[in-house]
Amino acid sequence: MSAVHMAARRGLLVRKLILIAPAAPLQLGNFLPDMAGRPVFEAAQAGDWALRLFTASQASLVALAPELAIKMMFRASPDADLGLLASPRFVDVLVCGLRTCLGQRQAAYRSELHAYVQPWAHVLDDIRCETEIWSGSHDDWAPPAMSDALKERLGDRASVNVCPGLGHYSTLRTALSRLD
């Protein structure tokens, strides 16, 4: 979402936008039922107190049992994402990110969530550059339908690279390795 906003504001100064496993604006489709992050987005839609309560419970879980938090995050993930959990480095980075977002940066995290659940599809209309979208065919965080909706809204300016069998994190890893 942030990259889309920046590219839209910068207009023709941006030559190319690359979106990897992107979450589309919720108003472009009925995506929530297929999203692993559905509970947090529903809490954000419910308002500040609901989101504060939800993120406080997430923070407690990460502080007390980070392994359990990760297990819950990946409970419905495809094998390609589950395989990443065998890497101690991947798990360490994930735990560090969770502790940062749910700890010292929790206010910023909540602010981003509140912004994401608000209508922002109109921002896509200001994208003038070529946009390359990477989507995992088994992504349970940003389902492929989101990439399709982004492509449809952006039209000829966008292309979608589908990564068969990959989920959210494995798509990120694959796209970054191919973009080097």
Image (tube, grey):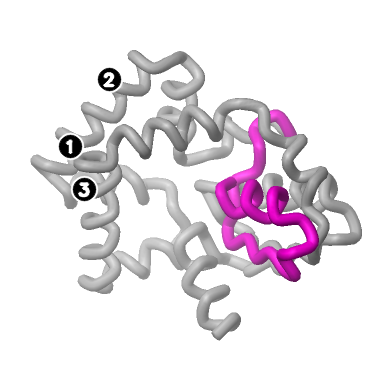
Q: Amino acid at mark 1?
A: Leu
Note whether 87 is above or below 4 in the view shown.
Answer: below
Residue at mark 3 to residue at mark 1: CA–CA distance:
10 Å
Q: Which residue is mark 2?
A: 53
Q: Quadrant of the C terminus?
A: bottom right
Residue located 65% across and 66% down the image: 18
Residue plotted at (27% across, 20% down): 53
The span picked out in magenta is 1-28
Q: Is residue 122 left or right of residue 144?
A: right
Helix, strand, or loop for circle 2? Answer: helix
**Which residue is pictured at 31% across the width and 33% down the height?**
107
Vertical position of residue 45 compared to residue 61: above or below: above
Residue topped by disc 1:
61
How dense is the environment of label 3, judged by Cα within 10 Å: few (below 14), some, or many (20 and up)?
some
* Mark number, residue 99: 3
Q: Which of marks 2 and 1 precedes in the sequence?
A: 2
Identify whether 46 is placed above or below 92.
above
Q: Position of residue 49 (x, y in %)?
A: 34, 14
